[in-house]
Every structure is written in structure tokens, then in C-alpha cells.
Amino acid sequence: MTTKRTAALVGNPNAGKSALFNVLTGARQKIANYPGVTVERKAGRMTLPSGEPVDLIDLPGSYALDAASPDEEVTRQVVMGEFEGQAQPDLLIVVIDAANLEQHLVFAQEIVALGKPTVVALNMLDLAERDGLAIDPSALSDALGVPVVPTVAVRRKGMDALAEAMDAARTQDVSTRHDVASLTLPERRLAARNMAKGAILSQSAGHRLHAGLDKVLLHPWLGPVILFALLFVVFQAVFAWADPFIGAIEGLAESVSGVVTATMPESFLRDLITEGVIAGVGSVVVFLPQIIILFAFILVMEQSGYMARAAFIMDRLMAYVGLSGRSFIPLLSSFACAIPGIMATRSIADPKDRLTTILIAPLMTCSARLPVYTVIIAAVIPASSVGPGFGLQGLVLFGLYIAGIVGAMLVALVLRRTATKGAASGFIMELPKYQWPPLRDLLIGLWQRAWVFLRRAGTIIFAATVILWLLLTFPKAEPGESQLDASAAGHIASFMQPAFEPIGFQREMTLALVPAMAAREVAVASLATTYAVEAEDEAETEDALRGQIAARWSLPTALAFLAWFIFAPQCLSTIAVARRETNGWKWPAVMVGYLFALAYVFAGLTYWGAVALGL
Ligand SMILES: Nc1nc2c(ncn2[C@@H]2O[C@H](COP(=O)(O)OP(=O)(O)OP(=O)(O)O)[C@@H](O)[C@H]2O)c(=O)[nH]1
Ligand SMILES: [Mg+2]
């Protein structure tokens, strides 16, 4: 009795292996886990045209044989015949995506080079056609040295030809196989590019345009320059375009406050509304236009397909600090908020890579810092121009974001040499097609962001502000005594002040740090409420916060406060999610500790540096 042959489907993720598996085996399949790991094992039976039954196994998608994730490790072991209890496949079916030919050929070469009987399924030809690509399977077959069968798994096209090729592969001559086993990854990438070039017969104008765009946007040095120029423009726009809207919202808040003061009798409730709710929460809500402008840019970059290119460009830069491009998307989401960013690290296979990414995510400037940054910049940095169309305020904001990024990269560098020592894993990512961002999706995305922001203002920021207002208002001051001195909040601030005096913080700034642990924006609300409670008269209560800051803070003090917020871990939710994702308090404690230490040191350096410069 001859033993039954085993064939395995291998290839990059999303090549269509499972789709092919389902078509080829029909209902005759068994799904279980591989022993010892929670990776799904799908095996089934098919009958070849010759009548020979074959066991077919569907392997997890993989980018290379030097495995990074548990999934890839299973694929490697099965292919190499090292997996206990799983017969080594006699035949390998490499599934490649015709629409992403160049990328998929990198791994395909590695499989072909193993020298086993191999058949290539050139799948997703329908998508390649949609993209305007015509591909010559025989050119590909010549280049790889194995049969190539065109397929469209979801339409069951090419299945008979594939089965016939599997039959014929029994007698495949593997001695003529090109030797690529000794090639390095960059060499395989280059070979893949040439193979793809040789096999693509024609491409439509649209496809050529995309390829041309990629040539420029992914250019080794032009690409990063364009990316940074683009980000620079984004931060310019955050200031330049938002100003009229912010002025309008501020004006509205002032007139509402005026109406409340005029119509309500003097009372506890009136003060709570004007000093707590309108001054405090209102001072945060005015930043809605800036949040919307920032996210409009981010969403357009995502939906147009540019963001994946940015990740690609960043990959090389991140390799210098021991991170892979896989960390880029989680870090990028952290510009909105560190919480989804930290959750997105689940896609990083290497545990040390992942831990490093979690630990540095809070250094990416989240949108909650935008109100703190912009109100202080608007107050103390002149709105002068530093060149045609470039304002100094936007430049400073850009600098703060860059400072966070540089800080994160340096911390990663240190971590990767100490606590999370290990080699960086490679990065291959599918680049989506360029497209015009659909207006509807853009508007929905903006609406969601605006809603998240306003909901925070209405809940956590509102609650923190009201509590702070109560602490600021009671106990009441004796005549002649300042309300801040007399209040409970004032006592708390005075208690903390000795620690923050050396880095140039004033007492109300120190006080703002406490409720800002709930959410960073509350620092703004807290300052506004403190100044409103302290105000001598109603006109002063209604004054916008940036005017108050401009009048009260020195430039070194303001810069020190900005420096503090680049680093400080002022967000309880981030700490909580870091605990959940690392299963314990150890790493969140490390994170909070190093971030506070950096914040303190850099705020101090900034303050004393600025004082020394005579600013
Ligand atoms: N248009 C088109 N879609 C396909 C084709 N083959 C597969 N797909 C679709 O592509 C997606 C990915 O296919 P899968 O079969 O899950 O890919 P896979 O290779 O098993 O992916 P992993 O298991 O993640 O490695 C699914 O939505 C399929 O329906 C094809 O030939 N044409
Ligand atoms: Mg699959």
C-alpha cells in the first residue's frame, strides 16, 4: 500500500489560501488546533484527476520562513517537516496574489528554493485585471522554475488546471531549480521586482500613475522629505485655519456667560455655571475646530492610501532604534489617543517589540494635548511669520510633536538595549491603491472624532472641573485674603508647590496637574476655572484663558509647562489599558515612572535654559 500524499497551501497572508482550500476540498475538511498551540489546523481531502486522493492542509499566512509570530512558526515547522505528528508535505502549493505580485514573490522564491515539488497558484487574477494589470504566467513560470497556474479562487476559476498541475508535480524535476536559498532578503526583494517586471505585460494608465506616485512618495530621501513637509503643513493649518472658529466659540462663551450673569441672581449656582462650566469646560470646547482640522488631515492621509506609505518610509527610520514598521500604525493611532494605540499593538507578533511600543505610545502627542499646547502657544508665542505662509506658532507646535517623537525613539533605543533587548523584526506590508478619499467616509470619521471630543468635555472634563471648582470655592476667603489661598485646592497646591517651584511652575499650574491626571485637557479647564474664581470682577471672569496666561506667565514658565506635557503620563485610562495589555502593574509602573522623571527633568531644563538665555 502506498502512503497517501500530502499537499500544503503556503503563501503570504490574504493570498487566498483558505479560499482555494475550501474550493478544492469542498465539505471534506476537518478543523482543529495544532497540538500545543492555538493555531487553527485545517486539513481536508481532495481527489486529483488521476484518481489519487491527496491530503490537503491550509497553512497560516506567512511572510518568510524565519518565523516571527506563532502562526508563522507553525507554517515554517510544517513546511520543513519539523512539526510533531504532521507528515511533511510532499507537494507545496504556493498561493500568490497577482495584484501584489512583487511582494508575494519574495516569500514564493523562498518556498521554491526548498527544492520540493511545487506548484504556484497565481490567484486573484480578477483583482489584477481590475487594477489594469495583464500578467504572463509562463514568464513567471520560467523565472521561478515551477509551473504557474492562473486562478480566481472565489469564482472557482483555474481549479481543474491546478489539480492537473498537482498531479503532474509527482514527477517534477527539481534539479533545475534556481538556487536562491543563499540570497539575502534585499536580494530576494530585488529578484522579486525583476520577476514581476518581466511577467507584467501591460498596465493601464491608472496603474502607471500609481506606480509613478509611489516612485516619488517612496523615494529613499524624497519620501521622508515629503512626509515631513506634509506634517509641517498640517500643524500650520491647525493654527492658521482654526483661529476664526476659535474666536467665534470664545465670543459665544463670553456672551453666554454675560447673559447668565445678567439674568441670574448672584448665587452659588451662577458662579458654578460661569466659573466652572463656562470658563472651565468652555475653555476646552473651543479647541474643537483644531481637533477637526487635525483629524481631517489624518483621515485624508489614511483613506487616500498615503498612510501605509508613511509607515513604509518610517520603517527604515524605526529600524535604527530597534523597532519595526509594524509599530508604526499603533504609534500613529496614538496621535489620536494612546488607548486605541496601545490596543493596536496586539498586531505585533514579537512580545518585546510589542512591549516597547506600549511603553513609548504615550509619548506620541495625543489630541488631548492639543488644547494645552495651543492655548499656551497662542498666549506666549507671537503670531509672527517665519517665512512666506509659515507662522511661528505652527512651527512651535510642530516642534512639540517632533519632540515627542524624538523622545519616543530615544526611549525605544534605550529600552531595546536594556529591558526589552532583542533584534528588530522585518516588515513587509501591503500598500493599498491610491484613491480619492470618499467624502462620506471622511465626514463620518470627522463626526465620530468630534463626538468623542465633545463627550469627553461633557463627562470627564465636566466632572473634574466641577469638583475642582468646589475645592477652589470652599472654604470661603476672609475679606482681604485671596480665594485661592483660602480654598482647599489652594492648600493642596501649596503642599505640592515646593516640588514644582524649582522647574518654574506657578501654584495654579501645579494645581492643574492634579485633575489633569483624569484627562490632559482638564489642565486647561483647571487653569481657566482657577483664574475665573480668582477674578476680581465679572468682566475678568469672562476673559478668555489665553489673555490671562499672556498677562500672568513668563516665557520660561510657559515653555517649561509645554515641556512637561510632552512627557508627563497624565492620563489614568492610558495607565489602566497598559496594565490590561501587559497583564500586571510592573510595566505600567515603569512607564509612569520614566515619563514623570523625563517630564520633570525636561521641564526644569527648559525653564532654566530659557532663564539663562534671558527669554
Ligand atoms: N477577488 C478575489 N478575492 C479572493 C480571491 N481569492 C481569495 N479572495 C478573497 O481574499 C480574502 C482573503 O482570502 P483567504 O483565503 O482568507 O486568504 P488566506 O491566504 O487564507 O489568508 P490568511 O489565512 O490570513 O493567510 C477573502 O476575502 C477571499 O474571499 C480571488 O481570486 N479573487
Ligand atoms: Mg487562511
Image (cartoon, rainbow, N blue to C red):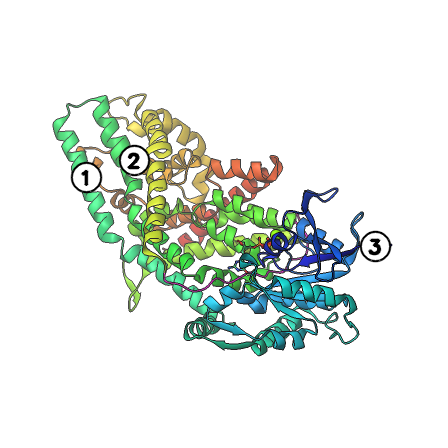
| Ligand 1 image position (quadrant) | bottom right
Rate crowding at label 1 as few (under 14), some (14 to 19) or many (20 or more) other CA atoms within 10 Å. many
In the picture, measured across the screen, residue 352 lies left or right of residue 393, that is: right
Residue 228: image location, x then y, percent: 43, 64
> Does the Cβ of the disc 2 residue fall within 8 Å of ligand 1?
no
The amino acid type, in three-letter code, at marker 3 is Thr
The tag earlier along the polypeptide, 1 or 2, is: 1
Q: Give the range drawn in magenta.
A: 419-436
> Does 183 appear above or below 528?
below
Residue that badge 2 annotates? 280
User: Splitting the image into 4 quarters, where does residue 139 fall?
Assistant: bottom right
The tag earlier along the polypeptide, 1 or 3, is: 3
> Does the Cβ of the disc 1 residue fall within 8 Å of ligand 1?
no
- For the residues carrying marks 1 and 3, which lies nearer the camera in this image? 3
In the picture, measured across the screen, residue 499 lies left or right of residue 453, that is: right
Depth check: give the residue in front, 512 or 467.
467
Residue that badge 3 annotates? 3
Measured in 3D between alpha carbons, the distance from the residue under mark 1 to the one under mark 3, in whole angstroms, is: 85 Å
Depth check: give the residue in front, 96 or 301.
96
Residue 102: image location, x then y, percent: 58, 69
Rate crowding at label 3 as few (under 14), some (14 to 19) or many (20 or more) other CA atoms within 10 Å. few
Residue beneath the point at 66% across and 66% down:
120
Measured in 3D between alpha carbons, the distance from the residue under mark 1 to the one under mark 2, in whole angstroms, is: 12 Å
Figure quadrant of the N terminus: bottom right
- Magenta segment includes 422: yes
